[in-house]
Amino acid sequence: MTDTTIPAQFSPDNAGTPAPAAVTTTPAATAAPASESRLADVGRGVARWAAALAGAIAIFTLLLLVKGANPADVYSHVWTSTFTNSPSIQQIFVKAAPLLLGALAVVVPARAGLVNVGGEGQIVIGAVAAGGIGISLGDKLGGGLVMILMAVAAMLAGAAWAGLAAVLRLTVGINEAVSTLLMNYIALDVLLYLIYSPWKDPHGTGQPTTAELADTAKLPYLGTTSIHIGFVFALVATAVVWALLRYTTWGFRLRVIGGNPEAARRAGLPVAMLLLSAMLVGGALAGLGGMVHYAGVEYKLRTGITTNFGYIAFLASWLARHNPVSVVLAALALAAITVAGDSLQLDSGLPAATVNILMGLVLIAVLGWTARKKGGAAR
Amino acid sequence: MSNLAVDVLAGAVGGGTAIMYAGLGETISERAGVINLGTEGSMLGGALAAYAATATSGSPWVGALAGIGAGAALAAVHAVLVIARKANQFASGLTVMFFALGLTSLFGASYVGRTIHSLNPWKVPGLAAIPWLGPILFDHDPLTYLSYFVAPAVWWVLYRSRVGLLVRTAGEHSEVLLVHGYSTSLVRYVSVIAGGGLCGLGGAQLSIAYSNAWFENMTVGRGFIAVALVIFATWNPLRVMAGSYLFGAALALSPALQARGYGINQFALDAIPFVVTILVLAILGKRTLLAAPDELRRVFETRTT
């Protein structure tokens, strides 16, 4: 197997656009000239990104003006309350943890050419599984043990949720983008079902929730910050995914399938098992994302526990072009936009969801105007 | 005591109409080879625009037109991204959804809680008196009645008219259009934008006829349900009509049961449409996929670039 000679293909411009398998096996011949043209590529890439982001912000400013808000005030408020005080900055990292794990759940299947739109459902079902452990065992076992059990349960649940979609694709040919999307709603209904009757906190008032997780089972904070250890989990997961995709036969084979499934099949790769494994790993990561959000922030299962994290994570992965390193930045950026939304509501009296406009515009700009065009191949 | 079946079925028709409009719009778009996950966004845009225009003009019909316009405009963003800029269709659709969610939150905040002159249910004289059928089919808002004609009309246009032939050709064999001197891009633009207009009308039905209210994210997934429905209905407008009532019935079942004092957990019932869709797709399996427009199948199979 030629997996030790995979070229470094993780620059923002060409990661996520799997090269044909034949090219990846002859890196030595192209290595030297590639480094020069790559520099030029990076320059052009940066310019494109800057222009795209500027365009997005210009349109957002225009919309604020139409609404009658003073954009200068809005921006300065958001800036001061999001980026100049430490609780908000910490909040960005807190929000980024499930987003990063959810985005990795898109990255891994994408490597094999699968579209996982089901991050939302996998995060929810991960949180549900963690909640099940937390509620039943939270105060009966040691905190560390409960945390491990919660993480394992969440990863298994997320993997099962995504794996079911993979199985449906491999056996009866249902497209995974469709099945994962449908299963998001089923996961949400499972969550709502549980918190409205069997797991409902009998002492709770107002909106139904589950009982609070035992203090010993809550994820610990990093030092004196309010950033829980889940963010570290997410970073470790990123490193592991990066290494797996880059240095293992498994990662190489996924890329081959993503590049040309027919060639992979003819080369004798176990395509079905590889596709299944990619979805299982992705689902497990998203499930873990649900667990860290539950055990690190929420402590109770409630309606709207995820607030579209899975979809935002999907977009984060696209923002990063499915590159497991850039995805950290993308997750932090989108987390910052989300946190800025809360500032917007408090300081400027605009609805928090307003920031979705900015997120949408940035993504429109990035999807439409930063990609290298490859003729008719891209759709 | 009113009849449970009648209640559920009447709820299915009234509540399924918004999903039907969106599903019909999505059918047109997908028939031309473009999947649009932004239906949710087009519905939201349509719902707010219709509500705001009704509040401003006093006429719900102006509102319905505004809803169509807003839905079409949002779909146009998706069309430009995927047709001109060749962006990934799944990512682009979700992006438009978030964009619309933000826009409608920002501009809709001042309409929350406002009352408008809405489209009230109107009993069709004579027909509404028919037992069973009357209350199920003929005691609704005008936009629901309109949908009785729109679904067959979409079917007729797609399968019996020249325009429909062009749309379907764009979705099956776009190179044939090229050979005959048509622009595939133009056909797709028209299809996606027209589809968005129908989604917007669905949103309008929701805000100015069904709920008589506007609130943030009021479509709560109906747009995504519509996307699933189109596949469930194997890209056939008449089956979309039937399917939307099935989904509507599932949504109407739990309130109807609860009103009668049955302690039903509605969320178990809410999951039914999704589970059924997956089961149907699994049973029909590859046959469903074969019914998909060829170019759309290529979208599904084309990879993550």
Image (cartoon, grey):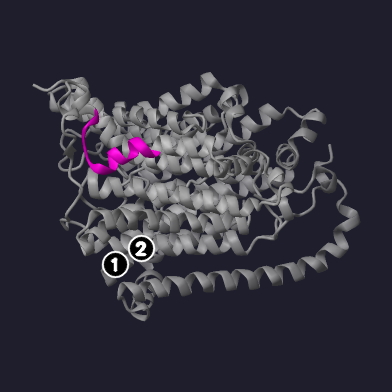
Q: Which residues are magenta?
A: B137-150
The circle on residue B282 is none
Please state the horizontal and vertical placement of residue B118, each as a whole percent of the image. Answer: 19, 51
Label 2 SS = helix
- Is B191 left, or right, of A140 in this rendering? right
Q: How many marks?
A: 2
Please state the horizontal and vertical placement of residue B128, each as a whole percent of the image. Answer: 17, 29
Q: Chain of mark 1?
A: A
| Residue sitting farthest toward the right | A29
Circle 2 residue: A354
> Looking at the image, is A58 positioned above or below residue A184?
below
Label 1 SS = loop
Residues B274 and A22: in front is: B274
In this rendering, do the residues under marks 2 and 1 share a single chain?
A: yes
Circle 1 residue: A350
- Is B111 left, or right, of B287 in this rendering? left
Q: Residue A321, can we see it?
A: no
